[in-house]
């Protein structure tokens, strides 16, 4: 299982490699990742129980 940080960072790498601003991730992901809400990986995020 991957965390929200990975979901956010992968398009950033593609954007930099391809010089394509369309690969910029949704701002909502950054808003969730910055305070440490990484999803199931950290136990904080959108999940109501651990998977």
Image: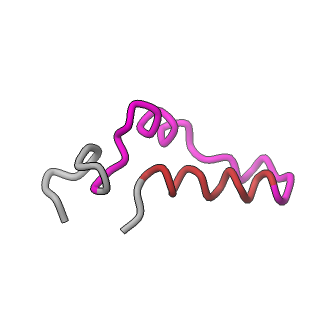
Quadrant containing the C terminus in the rendered view: bottom left
Tell whether 51 sits left or right of 3.
left
Question: Residue 8 at x, y = what percent?
Answer: 55, 50
Vertical comparison of 15 with 33: above or below: below
Quadrant containing the N terminus in the rendered view: bottom left
Name the foreground residue: 33 vs 20. Answer: 33
| Residue found at the very far bottom of the displayed protein | 1
| Quadrant in the rendering for residue 37 | top left
- Residue 34 falls inside the magenta stretch: yes
Vertical comparison of 14 with 38: above or below: below
Vertical comparison of 6 with 34: above or below: below
The residue depicted at 65 percent of the width and 56 percent of the height is 11
Tell whether 13 sits left or right of 33.
right
The residue depicted at 51 percent of the width and 37 percent of the height is 30
| Residue found at the very far right of the displayed protein | 19
Region rendered in magenta: 17-40
- The total number of labels drawn is 0
Question: Residue 6 at x, y = what percent?
Answer: 51, 56
Question: Residue 39 at x, y = what percent?
Answer: 32, 51
| Quadrant in the rendering for residue 3 | bottom left
- Residue 46 falls inside the magenta stretch: no
What's the image's color scheme? Answer: secondary structure
The residue depicted at 82 percent of the width and 58 percent of the height is 17
The residue depicted at 13 percent of the width and 56 percent of the height is 49
Question: Residue 42 at x, y = what percent?
Answer: 29, 49
């Amino acid at each position: 299982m991957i965390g929200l940080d990975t979901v956010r960072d992968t398009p950033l790498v593609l954007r930099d490699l391809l010089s394509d601003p369309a690969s910029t991730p949704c701002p909502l992901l950054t808003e969730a990742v910055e305070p440490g809400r990484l999803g199931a990986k950290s136990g904080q995020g959108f999940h109501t129980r651990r998977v």
